[in-house]
Image: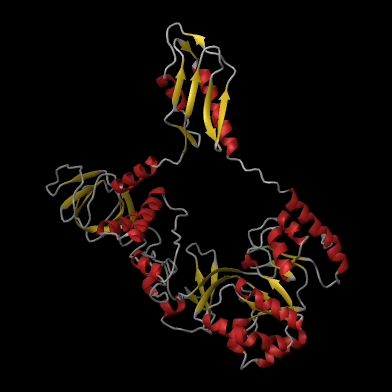
Amino acid sequence: MYENNKSIYNNKYLLSKKDIFGIDYIHKLINIGVTSLKIEGRSKTLEYVGIVTEKYRKCIDSNIDEKDIKDLKQIFIRSLESSGYFDKIGSIESISENCAKNTGLKLGTIIGKKDEYIKLKLEENIDLHDGIEIYTSENVVSTIVTCIKNDKFITFNKEVLSDNIVWIGDISKSVNIGDIVYKTSSNKLNKEYRDKILKINRKNLVTGTINILKNTNVNMDLIINNEIVNIFINYIPQDSVNKQVDSEYIDNQFSKTIDSPFEFTNLNYNIDDNLFVPVSKLNELRRDIIKRLDESYIVNIDVTEKYNKLDEYIINHNKSLNNLQHNKSKNENSIFIYKYNSIDEYKYIGDYSNIIYLNISDIRRYELQNIDIISKYINEKDVYIYIPNIVLSNLDKYIDSDLERLIKLGVKGILFGNIGYIKMAIDLKSKYGIRIVADYSLNIVNTYAAIFFKEKGIDKITISTEIDESEIQNIANIIDIEVIENFVTAMTSRFCPVKAYSKVCNCNNNSYELKDNHNNIRYNVICDNTDCTVKLVRNISCIENNIFSKRKCII
């Protein structure tokens, strides 16, 4: 972290949050009316999802024990656990500043070394193929346990329980007596949950009667969508010479559904004596049945009416891009797009010289001593008030009590990034004739969303940053688009790294920066004492008097 380009805190993971260990709060959440929990699973292993889901389910239904807690911590934990925001606003105790990945459970401290082995008094059980990490003064050594010797240095290679002394190998990299060792994965635990997951039958079970009869095509009777259906192939069984068809012979072919969402089970058989059907014909029947079952799950929805309504909407509102630009004055365009030319430079299409966006949080903080600046802007520019995507209690109270007063001063519009203020904005538009712009944080990514906001009374939108060029054009046919940012807000947080690491709370001093460990990207740390929040912002380029930006590039 830097203050005025001077390093004040280095080589730490200043934003690496400890894992929120919420298992202790489950029943409290249930008691206050929470009915659903979202469990983190993206980019996690199958075993992680299985263990966490099972333990939280168990906690909801009854209670968990010490082993359940240990399993949760073993499968993934970033440093020590944290209660997050359940108890209080995030503090430095909630940050894992020395590690940004799984540390697992503390296995012990190195008390001896011999060849490529380290000696430990175990604080947890250890077994072959468990993962361990050794934290040295210079780096972290990661490895898998490949050999275990007892305290007499005799090869044991079985699970050893905690409180015993063992030698663990092979540790090929340099480590030292006193280094701490963590058990980052348990092979036994992972295997237990892999096996559990594999045993879960996710297939749709299919039953019915297979008919192998003389002078009749090979066929099967089964129920599809509550109707009895007969599926047959164009093949009549032949008289057997050496081998005749039986249930085992058919089962072998109908069990080959590994790549299908279906599984045949409890089949019935109606088979005449001394008949034979080649394997290829049974496979053909099986494939035809699965194809028919697949088709039964397809839901045909006629979307013609929806698309016709969309086309009709576009035509009736005369929103082709050419007509839009033809009907506008030369100072107003339908689409404003920005492009990154480099890290610090931007190229704009469109002219924003007549518009300024003022963050309502800035207005709240600076209005009393700088009312002349606000009046100056209103007299010289079309001023829009920006309501950010994250609004906490103090700013919400200010918006509720003072937004209309600010509109009366001559503000021309509202840019809102929080859906909770759409009704307020629409009411003010109806009363004062202001214009309303929906910000990118509302994630408007398709024409249906554009129609929704247009019909609500929104005049312009700033599209989602995830949208592609073709959809931009489609949305532009519905509603005016503008992009008015020249920075990226990477994070909004109630945890303040400035206060935590510089030991100073200076919410009006925006001279702090965070730099990544490759020295490529710097983030400006913008503190706001309205609700004690912090934003990490890329590429601030237009500050005036450290108060307001000429465009919406200062939060």
Mark count:
0
Residue 133 or residue 24, whichever sits in front? 24
Please say if 291 is above or below 474: above
Image x and y of residue 162, in percent: 19, 54
At a point 73% along the width and 71% down the height, the residue shown is 457
Please say if 264 is above or below 174: above
On the picture, is 232 further left or further right than 39?
Answer: right
Image quadrant assignment for residue 89:
bottom left
Image x and y of residue 41, in percent: 45, 55
Task: Specify the quadrant that holds the C terminus.
Answer: bottom right
Please say if 79 is above or below 202: below
- Seen as rendered, the residue at the extreme top is 241
- Seen as rendered, the residue at the extreme left is 152
At a point 40% along the width and 61% down the height, the residue shown is 100
Q: Can residue 103 be seen in this view?
A: no
Q: Can residue 54 be seen in this view?
A: yes
